[in-house]
Image (cartoon, rainbow, N blue to C red):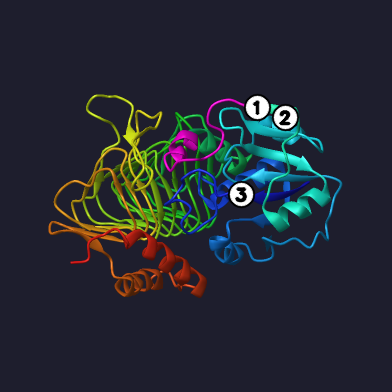
Amino acid sequence: MTPAIVFDDGGGRLAPLTDLRASFDIRTGALTTLERLKLALDLDVLALRTPEPIAQLTRERHPGIEVNSWSAKNAAAGVLLMNGRCPISYEPIANLEVGQSVIEATSGETIAAMVSADAASAFMESGNLPPAAATPMAKLPGVALLSRPWHVRTFRDDCIASDLELLGDAEPPEIPPGVTVFGEHGLTIDPSAKVYPGVIIDLEHGPVAIGQNVTIRPGATLIGPCAFLPHCTVLDKALIKGNTAIGPYCKVAGEVGGTIFQGYSNKGHDGHLGDSFIGEWVNLGAGTTNSNLLNTYGEVISVAAPGMSNEKTGQQFLGAIIGDHVKTAICTRIMTGAVLHTGSMFAQSAAIAGCIGGFAWSTDMGRRPFRFEKFLEVARAAMKRRKVELSPAMIERLKSIHSQATAALPTG
């Protein structure tokens, strides 16, 4: 195994994806980036480094791994410093020697660097990356690091393909009674999963992986490539199209395609959701539907954060980026390329468009701050249903985001 430190350098403008988690904990495919890199690069993760505001949340997610400190007990001749904004295990990374690095050609930012144990210790103390090698081993063209929220869509297909290969079983599973399966790609069904009669699994265009304690209700259609993470539920007659990953403890219905659910979120009713990213603790009201293609069939233009400029996304198909704890009312419409930041509540008859800042309470009367005490009440009620409690560190982080996000909203 390769000794490694995986880090979040805080680069780019990735909120709302990174409001409550490090960049390496984003579910960029069926797996989070950290899970994928560990498996694909055979990493022995010695420590993690993050911006200080999310350090305690990272400790809670990764008990047993040092965060923003390193005792160097397992010091090795070479330690790989791996940028958590890189979701793909590019081949040059696996071949680095001490003093060599891989960089993103356009930005010049470090993707990975193999350094001495002393240099790794210095990095953990200061957060400053060692100077890149005078002649990097490789310069990767194009986008190799996440730097905007919609880059989860940019990397989605490659990440899901890699993950399904990592998660696939060598031997085909026993097909549950009454389930129709066709196509030549792989199928993985954990023995603890319950797949009801009447389910159709289409493997013509890619594999399907059904994880531990997953429930697939009667009449659902699953079109590969797609993955279903532990304890998620696909409801009756749902249509799950390719390049979709349903995170743990999610519940989905209706038509869902090309979408990643981070986890713990519900889309429990009919409505279309396409080419989108859904954070944690999101609830989409019945009939919530998004657009993922412009009427002009042109490149989608989006805005990453309030106050930023329009940017080309490089995508023809791009739905919505929906941050953690966002709620929508029944029959909500979300326009192409919308970015909805953490903690916002939408109960408006007009379609949601553009970039909406965090903790906005949006109705036909206008947009006002979502009172933090009320937000916590709603969050606790939603999380209690999954037997999860808000930690003090999470509350403090949410309070900080709320303060920043609502400063510019009218209060009258």
Residue 208 pos. (x, y %): 49, 40
Considering depth in this image, is 407 or 186 the residue closer to the camera?
A: 407
Q: Is residue 242 left or right of residue 111?
A: left
Residue 136 badge: 2
Q: Is residue 142 left or right of residue 180?
A: right
Considering depth in this image, is 139 or 407 the residue closer to the camera?
A: 407
- Give the structural element (helix, strand or loop) at label 1: strand
Inter-mark Cα distance, 3 to 1: 24 Å
From the image, which quarter does the C terminus lie in? bottom left
Q: Residue at x 15, y 48 (%)?
A: 350
- Name the kind of residue labelled 3 in the image: Glu
Asked whether the residues under the numbered discs 2 and 1 touch, taking CB atoms below 8 Å apart as contact, a structural biologist would say yes
Q: Is residue 300 left or right of residue 226?
A: left
Of marks 3 and 1, the one in the foreground: 1
Quarter of the image for residue 149 reads top left
- Give the structural element (helix, strand or loop) at label 2: loop
Q: Of label 2 and label 3, which has the lower sequence position?
A: 3
Does the magenta portion include 276? no
Residue numbers of the magenta segment: 139-156
Inter-mark Cα distance, 2 to 3: 26 Å
Q: Residue at the right extreme? A: 77
- In this orientation, does residue 98 appear? yes
Residue 324 pos. (x, y %): 39, 57
Disc 1 marks which residue?
139
Disc 3 marks which residue?
35
Q: How dense is the environment of label 3, judged by Cα within 10 Å: few (below 14), some, or many (20 and up)?
A: some
Asked whether the residues under the numbered discs 3 and 1 touch, taking CB atoms below 8 Å apart as contact, a structural biologist would say no
- Give the structural element (helix, strand or loop) at label 3: helix
Looking at the picture, does residue 297 appear above or below residue 273? above
Looking at the picture, does residue 12 appear above or below residue 326? above
Q: Of label 3 and label 1, which has the lower sequence position?
A: 3
